[in-house]
Amino acid sequence: MYKKVHLRLAALCAGITAAIMIIMSFFYLYVSETGLYRNQYNLFKNDMNTITTNLEQQSVISMEWLSKMEAQGNYTLFVLDNDVPFLYNQLTSLPESEKFQLLNESLAAYNSRYIISKAPDASSPYTSFHVEFEFTSPSNQEKYFCGIATIERGSSFLKIVVLFSLNSLKQQMREQRLNFVLINILAIFLLFLFSYVFTGKLLKPILENQKRQTAFIASASHEFRTPLAVILSSAECCVDAPAEKKNKFLNNIKKEGLRMSALINDLLTLSNSDSQSFPIRKKPTELDTLLINAYESFEPLAKEKSLSLSIDLPNDTLPLCHCDPDRISQVLSIFLHNAISYTPQNGKINLSLSYKKGTFSISVKDNGIGISDEEKKKIFDRFYRAEQSRSTKGHFGLGLSIAYEIMKSHNGTIGVKDSALGGSEFFINLPCS
Ligand code: ADP
């Protein structure tokens, strides 16, 4: 399922980017090809200009010069005197039959396009003009730029037909297109790879969250199974039990019902925190009063287990802390409840408060069973219980994760370390405002 979504997302990402890239590159290709064509045509026109001007100035046509022009521009040149080809055999390297055909085709194209009637210029001994156009040879279907210059010398006139095959330009464009296609294929492949890695990174937290949710549901169901089994078996026994034993079973049902209710409350708190609907009602709070209240609530329980519970408060008057007193009391209850649960008889528990540079620190130290360094990293995880505390009834491994969420919503910190008393020390740091 995840793999499918991942692949689809990567394909979608790569597809959209590739489509934009292909459109842009084809647009660029179009602009570049039009530019290439225009440049070549302008070059050809310039050369035609040079050829015409030179021929105008030469009284004798230089073969050497014409051959140079032909080689330089990769042209096919024909010179006609009064429409009769001359210098015809010496120029152009094409086979005889092709030469003649090409010349005729270009002249036919010229005649079909232009009707030229130009009055001789009285101020100049010669009149010259030239035209350039593109034409496709009907015999070989090749495209050419064709330039025809006419130089009139009195009653006779000289014609120069210059042809430039667009084959090389076409070849250049074909190569450019092929390069573009290859580059695009490579880019699409790289895009897909990048999208796959990128979307994988994006999906990772979602996948982890999903895994956490599944584990959470599995653990919660597991926790519900034990009290439910006790309730069901007690209810069954209750039916046939004699009146004096019925109370025992009813008590079991009530005890397990209360356990389930506590578990549901914890689960609701965590689920509210996950959906960001954790109600936090901050108000100016006297933290020392909060600690005294917690101390007074837990003292009887500590006494019951023969534990000595002490409290240390600063002598100075403390500033008020902007926090949710109910939630901070809940954290204190979790710490004290755990300390009482995991400290053997005659042990010591100390609750203390200090204030430094705008931060309150509250800690609960005990000299109980302690927590190994390995377990210190895990105890804030949901449903995590250290091995030795698994048998402790009424502990679902949710208390510290609730405390963690409460501190997160207060922008505070929470932690655990080895206590000076010999067990563990849980602490929270709470900003004043
Ligand atoms: P639980 O309901 O199981 O106490 P918590 O989330 O409050 O769940 O605590 C997680 C685990 O951390 C406990 O199962 C226990 O192993 C360990 N722990 C918590 N407090 C103490 C403590 N004061 N001393 C030793 N171990 C503790």
Image (cartoon, rainbow, N blue to C red):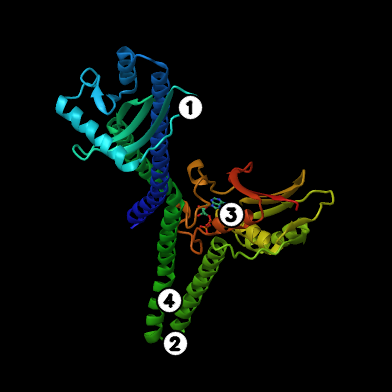
Compute the Cα span from label 3 to label 1: 104 Å
Instruction: Say what amino acid the circle numbered 3 marks.
Output: Tyr
Instruction: Say what amino acid the circle numbered 2 marks.
Output: Ala
Between discs 4 and 3, the one toward the N terminus: 4
Between tags 2 and 3, which lies in front?
3
- Structural crowding at the residue carrying mark 4, measured as other residues with C-alpha within 10 Å and reported as few (<14), some (14–19) or many (≥20): many
Compute the Cα span from label 1 to label 4: 125 Å
Q: Quadrant of residue 223?
A: bottom left
Compute the Cα span from label 2 to label 1: 143 Å
- Judge by depth and name the residue closer to the eye, 432 or 181: 181
Between discs 2 and 1, the one toward the N terminus: 1
- Judge by depth and name the residue closer to the eye, 83 or 414: 83
* Label 4 with label 2: CB-CB less than 8 Å: no
The answer to whether one can see residue 126 in this image is: yes
Rendered view: 237 above or below 175: below
Rendered view: 285 above or below 160: below
Q: Position of residue 128 (x, y in %)?
A: 41, 27
Q: Residue at x 41, y 44 (%)?
A: 27
Q: Which residue is mark 3?
A: 404
